[in-house]
Amino acid sequence: HHNIRSRASLWGFPSMRPMRCAYQPDVEEVSNLPEWKFNSTRKDDPKEQPDIAWHWEFIQAPQNEADYAKTYIEDVDTKALLLPNILDVDILMALACISPEYSDLFKRLPVQGIIY
């Protein structure tokens, strides 16, 4: 496995993004358990490992040393939600029907990840 970057560009138009989310089915083929796929014997390049090219798109590294000083380069934490089929219509409908007294649910990171 390769390291997940700790600094990334969160630039967005028309404003900065508070988070970036990706729904990816990286699973170990035999056990079907979640796995961050990466072949360390191959080059750390999306052209060398196209089946996981989303890794490089998801956490966009600064292009050069000068970019690290720009305001849209942020320290980032990457979290994984190990819950299959979380982007289900029934879950989204349940979130849409939440009454105002339970609106604190939307402050939770997994719910924000589903919505973003």
Image: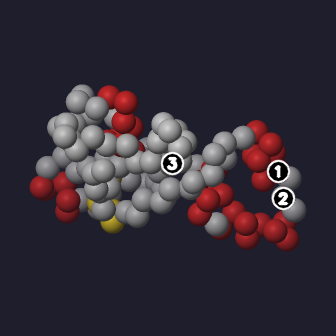
Picture coordinates of residue 62, whole percent (x, y)? 23, 51
Picture coordinates of residue 77, whole percent (x, y)? 40, 64
**Left or right placement of residue 79 versus residue 95 in this view:** left
Residue shown at 55% from the left, 42% from the top: 32
- Viewer can see residue 96: no
Ranked by sequence position, the earlier of labels 2 and 3 is 3
Residue shown at 35% from the left, 49% from the top: 59
Q: Which amino acid does label 1 sit on?
A: Ala
**Mark 2 against mark 3, which lies toward the viewer?**
3
Q: Distance between the residues labelled 2 and 3?
A: 29 Å
Q: Which amino acid does label 3 sit on?
A: Pro
SS type, badge 3: loop
Ranked by sequence position, the earlier of labels 1 and 3 is 3
Residue shown at 30% from the left, 50% from the top: 1
Residue 94 image label: 1
Q: Which amino acid does label 2 sit on?
A: Ile
Q: How far apart are marks 1 and 3 (CA)?
A: 25 Å
> Which residue matches tag 2?
98
Q: In which quarter of the image is residue 51?
A: top left
Give the colour scheme of this rendering.
Answer: secondary structure
Q: Nearer the viewer, residue 65 or 58?
A: 58
**Mark 2 against mark 1, which lies toward the viewer?**
1
